[in-house]
Image (cartoon, rainbow, N blue to C red):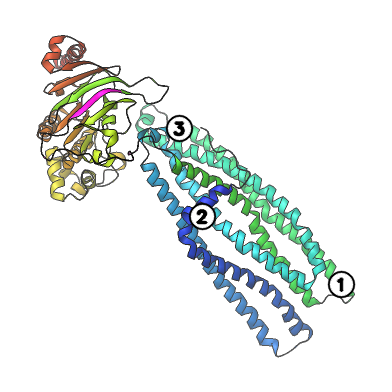
Amino acid sequence: MSGPKPQRKILVGPYLRLAREFALPYRVLIGLAAVLMIAEAALQGLLAYLLDPAIKSLFIVKDPTMLFILPLALLGVMVVKAGVSYGSNVSLARVGQGVVTDLQAAMFAKVTRYDLSQLNAMHSGQLAARFLNDAGLVRESVTKGMQGAVRDALTLVALGVVMFYEDWGLALVITAALPAVALYTLNLGNKSSKAATKSMVSTGDLAIHLSEILDGRRVVKAYRMEDRAIARAGQILAERMKHLMKGAQARAAATPSAEALAGVGVAAVVFYAAYQGMHGTMGVNNFTSFLAAMMFSYQSIRNLSNFYTAMSEGSAAAARSFELLDAQTAVNDAIDARPLVLAPTPPRGAIRFADVTFEYAADSNAALRGVTFDVPPGKMVALVGPSGAGKSTALNLILRFYDVTSGAIEIDGQDLRGVTMASLREQTALVTQEPFLFDDTISANIGCGRPGASQMEIEGAARAAAAHDFIMRLPHGYDTVTGEAGVRLSGGQRQRIAIARAMLRDAPILLLDEATSSLDTESERAVQAALALLMKDRTTLVIAHRLSTVAGADRIVVLDHGRVVEQGTHGELLARGGLYARLYRTQFVDEAEPQAAVAE
């Protein structure tokens, strides 16, 4: 899997856009945080300076009037500084969390509206890693960026003013050493940034692997793949650990290095001050204030040592987030799109495929080629054919999960590309071969077919789908939580809940993709009876492998290799002796042989 390239520089563009689109709503809070950080920097400088008069008045002049005033002044400055620091930190945290929360909400909304081809091209595990890991990096960069640019930088300025005031010569010597400190911390930042970016790739790999193992847990168990999965996870974790340790080592080196440099500085200051003191040119009060300012400044320098790393990682993470936001969807509403308008009463919802060709990708073979057929309003039409013939593709095109490559699909004479997708999907109900349930209550899963439906309506739909009885046998009835993707229910139970959802929707167009494939014989009879009532006066397009279930269709369209090869009723197609007849006879023999064996 390809991952992000290591970033060795701060990308300005993503931060400008982040500020413009996501930080602007927090401008008042940002302004408050900036004011508080400026005050904090000034108070830090004032604290270092107050040591000068304190030492002079209390230890040299020994002025009794200052015995309480100066200690109280120092205490007051420290208390106010603590309060200001708390306020600035809380404000920054609110800004950082707010910006990231809004960014995540925008990313989620965008990804949710991706068309099916985009979602199929992205792994859910990688998406989850971007949402969680990248968001954390953006948050760190926002908070540390503001702290570094305002509080730490201004603190260095304030303390620098104190040092120059106390002894400008010694201050120049200390200042001259700052470029060397900056280069060293920059080098550490580069190493940390490179390691962190590589660890992000490993984090994405881990998320993908975990997602696949959980989604494919039945296959993993059936084929005894546990050891292989564990070994692969161990490899990914070891690789991730290696990069995390490199980053940790680089970051860990920053603090000891700063302390070592501080030690050199302290030694130089002590030597210089002692020499000057022996010659009577520097007082102990000046020395103490200067030393305090220098020591305080190293804390800011240490904070700034991680500034470059946080900013470079954050800019890269923000850039990846904007890639998701800027991705162009292939299926969109036209500028002049209008709502799909159907007749107020049945029959309505005639579907027409007019010379439809569709390719999933520009360089792939066509899934449908020149397909033409009609689904009359209020009638049932079945699509049959071998696997890969294009049956499910046809249903996907009706819902505009994809757009046709050429030709047109119309409903009541309206080209689907000219109507809004929302109005199109409001007029349809879909039941798929592999029903999906949300990790919510059964009532909520059925209810999403028509938001706002009453409990009585939900239970009525469940009764019609032959689901009410088994639901009531569950420990919590309709309040039973189905688990991830409905894992706590059997395949047949999930299918009946999905059918109940479609029944509750009560849409004029019904799309059934192997809707009864997971049901046992008894349940299938009950559901088929319910479907017969549901399909009354509704335009219904059915996909079924069991041809006996579509024998009563008003028309059967036979697809093979993406083309329509036959159309007609069940009797007409059997009499013709073509592909449908061969499929039907083969399936009839396959189904009859086991029954004969049982009878013997």
Which mark's residue is nearer the viewer, 1 or 2?
Answer: 2
Q: Is residue 456 above or below residue 32?
A: above
Going from the N terminus, do you reach mark 3 or mark 1 first?
3
Residue wearing tag 1: 276
Mark 1 belongs to which amino acid?
A: Gln
Q: Count numbered badges in the picture.
A: 3
- The circle on residue 19 is 2
Image quadrant where one finds the C terminus: top left
Residue at numbered disc 3: 229
Characterize the local packing of mark 1: few (<14), some (14-19) or many (20 or more) Cα atoms within 10 angstroms.
Answer: some
**At numbered mark 2, what does the secondary structure look like: helix, strand or loop?**
helix
Q: Residue furthest bottom?
A: 65
| Magenta segment | 328-356
User: Label 3: how many residues lie within 10 Å, few (<14), some (14-19) or many (20+)?
Assistant: some
Magenta segment main secondary structure: loop
Mark 2 is surrounded, within 10 Å at the Cα level, by few (under 14), some (14 to 19) or many (20 or more) other residues, namely: some
Please determine whether, in this image, residue 315 is positioned above or below residue 65: above
